Amino acid sequence: MADHSKNTPEIFELNNGSMQVKISNYGATITSLSVPDKNGKLADVVLGFDSVDPYVKGLAPYFGCIVGRVANRIKEGKFSLNGVNYTLPINKPPNSLHGGNKGFDKKIWDVAGHKKDGEKPFVTFKYHSADGEEGYPGAVSVTATYTLTSATAMRLDMEAVPENEDTPINLAQHTYWNLAGHDSGNILDHKIQIWGSHITPVDQHTVPTGEILLVKGTPFDFTEEKRIGESIGEVGLGYDHNYALDCPDQEKDGLKHAAKLRDGASSRVLDLWTNAPGVQFYTGNYVNGVVGKGNAVYGKHAGVCLETQGFPNAINQANFPSVVVKAGEKYQHTMLFEFSA
């Protein structure tokens, strides 16, 4: 296999004849994902850029990347673990967001394996996070493998092992989806169903208050399929909330159904399955005039993120599922993206 030196951001292709995915070793980032509509017409359904340069220059608002060591917000960038207090960079004042100033999304990962086409094409990325990186305790070895498991399905397996110290780990895949095509405008007419009957409501700085709130009778209720735009005006800038995933009877390969996203015009559907306890439903509220692939201009609500994850700020909330991984134990987070039309 070719030697992929550490310091070159590249884009790797996976193609099984019916879907085509492009993924960079910079941030383990999905830059393009093309799937057929009801007429077999391919469209690229993720927001992003044509080359790696804009990602490296920091022009992407977390388009397509894997974020870590801890996804989402940590209140005031502070936590204590095993009697030690830690302080993290405040990169989204007044909080620390998505791993800090230079999280996993801004690192060049090693390419440990790549099979471009044929049966079950895949690419495996590895990253070694040093002790103290972005303020976090202990060194961690991280692996992420993207595999096209069937004609129109992609699986992502993320693993992380703390080598010598307990540490919080919460990886999330931050792709912005637009099933009508990345350049087709906003996602307010997409319909979504989320298998979560509770959210973790947030304070004015988007950090969970610690409550776990029933969505029934609120604008956050997507337990039945509903248009994203239907009640979005009632929730401030838009949705940017963690849903506690229920454990429905529906299971696939040990994964639970997190969400079903549907675009009426193309009939494309994305079913998302995961083993994570939560999913951040984010409607691209802060995207504003980003010039992406083919000079498409992405505005507010141009894409929707479904980031399966541990609960935000869980390190500071005793009543949330713990995100602490003990030294030598393994963090495992799987997502299955199933497309249909």
Image: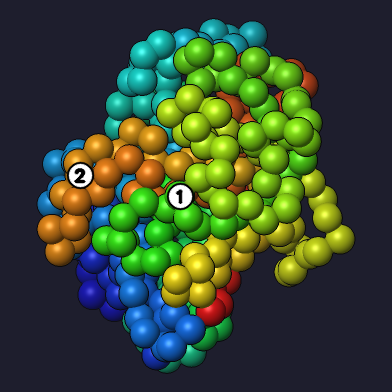
> In what element is the residue under mark 1?
loop
Residue 318 image point, x, y percent: 74, 18
Decide: is 252 above or below 215. below
In this figure, which residue is indicated by the disc labeled 1? 188
The mark tally for this picture is: 2
- Nearer the observer, disc 1 or disc 2? 1
The residue at 67%/50% (across/down) is 194
Task: Judge the density around disc 2: few (<14), some (14-19), many (≥20) Cα neighbours within 10 Å.
Answer: some
Q: Most extreme residue toward the right, as rendered?
A: 249
**As drawn, 12 above or below 242:** below
The front one of 197 and 316 is 197
Residue type (three-letter) at the residue carrying disc 2: Val
Taking 210 as reference, is 206 left or right? Answer: left
> How far across and down, in percent of the image, does residue 184 sit?
31, 61
Of 216 and 169, nearer the camera is 216
Task: Name the residue tied to disc 2.
Answer: 290
Describe residue 44's horizontal placement relative to residue 51 as left or right: right
Between 203 and 63, which is closer to the camera in this rendering? 203
Snapshot quadrant of residue 36: bottom left
| Identity, as a three-letter code, of the amino acid under mark 1 | Leu
- Of residues 192 and 101, which is closer to you in this image? 192
| Residue 32: % across, % down | 31, 66
- Quadrant containing the N terminus is bottom left
**Residue 317 visible, this orientation:** yes
